[in-house]
Structures are given as C-alpha cells and as structure tokens.
Image (spheres, rainbow, N blue to C red):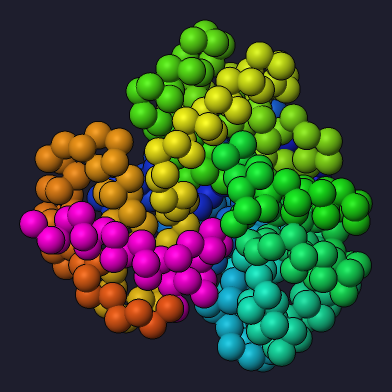
Amino acid sequence: MTQIRKNFGFGCMRLPMKGGEVDVAQFTKMVDIFMENGFNYFDTAHGYVGGKSETALRECLTSRYPRDAYVLTNKLSTHFFSRKEDIRPLFESQLAACGVKYFDYYLMHAQSADIFAKFKRCHAYETVLEFLAEGRIRHFGISFHDKASVLEKILAEYPQIEVVQIQFNYMDYDDPGVESRKCYEVCRKYGKPVIVMEPCKGGNLVNMPTEISRVLEDLRGGSNASYAIRFAAGFPGIMMVLSGMGNMEMMLDNISYMKNFMPLSQTEQAAVKKVCELFRAKNMIPCTACRYCTDGCPKQILIPDLFACLNAKKVFNNWNTDYYYHNVHTVHNGKASDCVQCGACEESCPQHLPIRRLLKDVASEFENK
C-alpha cells in the first residue's frame, strides 16, 4: 500500500495551460519538484481541465514513476453516467486515461441531496464497493457539497465510507451556506479523515483587495495562500489539503511552508478572522468558480466570470471590469439578462447561491447603462 508522505496534495482541477492545452513541459517539472520535496498525493476527476487532467497525469506522472511512488485519487462524477450499467465502463476508461491498474482513493463526486439520490437509483455506491472488493480501488470515499445534515445521512447509511472531501477554508468556516465547520464536525463524529478542497476559496483568499491583503502582509510571515492553506491543515483529523497549482510559482510557494508544516499562531488566527470581517463588509458574491453551474445553462452564460466581474467592480470600480464583461465574457456566450430563470444552475451550485437573483444584479450593473 502506497503511503501518503505529507498532508499536502496536488489538486489537478487546475493545471498550467498553454494555448488551451495542458503545458506538459511545465506540469512535468512541477510533478518532479513536488515529488522531490516529499509530496506524493494527486487528485483528479474525469471532467477536470475539460477532460485533459487524467491524460496529463498519465503523461507527466504515472508513465514516469513506479506505481508505489505516488497516491492517486479519482472520482465518479454524476455528469458521466445515467444508469448502473454505465459505471464500470466509465471506471475502466478512467484507469486507462490515467495509465494505472488501480486508484488509491475513489470518491463519489460532489455529493449533495439530489446527486446522492441519483447515485442510489443507479446503485453507484454498491458498484464502486465492488471495485474495492476487486482491488481496483484501495480506499472508498466521497466528496461533498451540501448541508451537514445531508452528510450525516450519507455517512450513517454507508459506514463503508473511509474518507470525506469537503470544502474548508477560513471564509466558509462559519458560512451558513457552506457549513464547513459543521461538515467537519460530522466527519469527526463519524471518525472519517478529511480531505480539504478549496482551501483558498477558488483564489479569493489569494487575490484580495489591497486593504484586506494588508492585514496579512503586516504579519510579514508568508503569502496570502500560506495562511489559507495552513489554516485548513491545522485542524485535527485533516488527512490532506489540496491546492490547484497553475504554475511553478504557486507550487514553490506552497512547498515552502508545507514541507515543514506549522499551524497558525494565535496572532495569525486573529488576522484571518479580521480578513473575514472585512470581506463580509464588502458583501461580495462568494463564488469559487467551480463552474458546475455552466454545464447545464441553456443560454451558455459564463456565470462565475460574470460574478467575478461584479465582485471586481465592487472592489476596484474601474473600466476594466466593464471591458471584460462586454468584450470577453459575453461575446460568444450569454449575458446576465439572457437568463431564462430555469434554475438548473442553482441545483448544481455547491455554494447554494441564489444565482438567478444575482444575475439580475449583474445585468443591472453592466447592461442598464
């Protein structure tokens, strides 16, 4: 059994890109440096990077390192099956795409009340437990985006679950929509190790407004990302903290403080609490740009990009946000005012955002001129 070396993992939802393709040369170098520094955990899914994440891992990792050198996690995603009979062929295609004979961890992806109901109808849990019995996966778990009460229901119904991946960061810790703290507490109650996703909240805790970022800069102790990732990693029962790293600079920064990990001091904890207070005072849309909402949009509205425009407008209030709205994000895709109020986006939103109402706010800001 391959052992996890450290509690920091390479999240392959975001990879270095070049001309619309994965930058294989840069990703290969990043994999090598990651491994050389004692880290060996990689996380992917079938739809990540437009379906290119798995094959990039095959080219840059699994074809170049012995199987016992790394830990690889993949997921069963709801978008790629509609009945039980689809699951095994999909799983086989994932193994082939990644170039491996087994996955160390295999997660039921993005579980919520509705998605869990579909997985039950399709006997997905039972099918994947067959893979576990066959030795095709070594550990069985879930990734989760819903209320803590739903998580507790799933863990009670399937005690075979070995690990739970949740969104966990200092902004969402007590957020009533995400319930990071409550979900973490449910995991602890059931004795499940936790994998953390979105520790930097989709980059929102890295690229912060100057007056907010200054709170952390005054500590003179590290990057904005370092405080977010160390916050998440400092809790008992955290097995792994994932970071999507799009370039070498991000990787080297993350390695610098996770190689010899230290939890946040009391002074640093007070600083991140202050950051939360300042962000909430700005009333920004807490979108993490996971892009689940865009898949089923009949008007092909780039919802996360439009929300980012509105957030940036609130913070910077300059011409650049208008330019991006009209000349980049809506040139070949729908505008906020094109929303037909179908609600498909809200059903798939892990943050439980009132997207239809927020799109009206976006339209009011950028289109009613």
Magenta residues, start to end: 344-369
- Quarter of the figure that contains the C terminus: bottom left
Residue 92 visible within the image: no
* On screen, residue 70 above or below 155: above
Report the front residue among 317 and 88.
317
Residue 73 image-quadrant placement: bottom right
Above/below status of 170 relative to 15: above
Q: Nearer the viewer, residue 361 or 248?
A: 361
On whether residue 21 falls in the magenta region, the answer is no
Q: Residue at x 82, y 49 (%)?
A: 185
Q: Is residue 5 left or right of residue 295?
A: right
Q: Position of residue 97 (x, y in %)?
A: 55, 65
Nearer to us in this view, 36 or 240 = 240
In the image, residue 30 above or below residue 13: above
- Residue 343 shown left or right of residue 82 in the figure: left
Q: Position of residue 142 (x, y in %)?
A: 73, 63
